[in-house]
Amino acid sequence: MKKDIYIFKIFNKRYRGPLFHTNVLVEGKYKMPLVNERHDYEDEGKEIFKLYGPSFGEFVIESVFGQLFCHENMAFFHDGYSSMSQARWVIQKLSDGTYKIINMDSIKRALYCDDAKDVRGNRRVRMRPISNDKNNGSDRWIFKLMKTPKKMKKVFHSHGWETAESESE
């Protein structure tokens, strides 16, 4: 089965800002996902994601640093992470046009944006039970398509942008 590659910016519904990853490594391996409160926030491509899929209804979400994965209540970006289920996501469309991003390894948990923020307006992104709908949209996401497979002239790899042939359907 051919997997398509899509380039997106992903915005949190409640806080309106884009998902991105930190510059700082945690334990020398991971980078934390954050949401900035500014809708127009950009940081050298860290807010642009490549989505691979669908493969059996699952997607891989990758930043310039590495894949987004989940472990228990935490979400991280990791370059070269080996657990396939922890890096696979179901993207569930909701009736209001937003999406929940649900991890395959912890199927009862969805990505959400924390209420607390730092001085730069950044909020942590974590995992929480899907059934918790009393969060005013902090676990709902808006996908802004940047490039489709047919139009794509460049692809985003973990080491940066690379020129590629246009893909066909």
Image: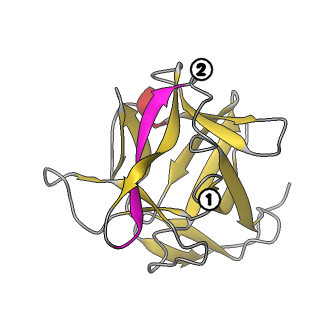
**Residue 9, placed above or below residue 91:** below
Query: Which amino acid, by three-letter code, is at mark 2?
Result: Ser
Residue 137 counted in the magenta span: no
Q: Residue at x 65, y 49 (%)?
A: 141
Q: Is residue 118 visible?
A: yes
| Disc 1 versus disc 2: nearer the observer | 2
Horizontal side of 147 relative to 49 (left or right) equals: right
Q: Residue at x 75, y 45 (%)?
A: 98
Could you say whether the residue bearing mark 2 is in a helix, strand or loop?
loop
- In the picture, the disc for residue 131 is 2
- Label 1 environment density (alpha carbons within 10 Å; few <14, some 14–19, many ≥20): many
Tell me the magenta residue range: 120-129
Horizontal side of 120 relative to 135 (left or right) equals: left
Image quarter hosting the C terminus: bottom right
- x, y (%) of residue 13? 65, 52
Q: Is residue 5 visible?
A: no
Horizontal side of 71 relative to 138 (left or right) equals: left
Image quarter hosting the N terminus: top right
- Label 2 environment density (alpha carbons within 10 Å; few <14, some 14–19, many ≥20): few
**Residue 108, placed above or below residue 60:** above
Tell which circle, 1 or 2, labels the residue nearer the N-terminal end.
1
Q: Residue at x 54, y 73 (%)?
A: 38
Q: Main secondary structure of the magenta part?
A: strand
- In the picture, the disc for residue 11 is 1
**Residue 115, placed above or below residue 8:** above
Query: Which amino acid, by three-letter code, is at mark 1?
Result: Phe
Could you say whether the residue bearing mark 1 is in a helix, strand or loop?
strand
Q: Image quarter for residue 46?
A: bottom left
| Cα separation between marks 1 and 2 | 21 Å
- x, y (%) of residue 77? 37, 51
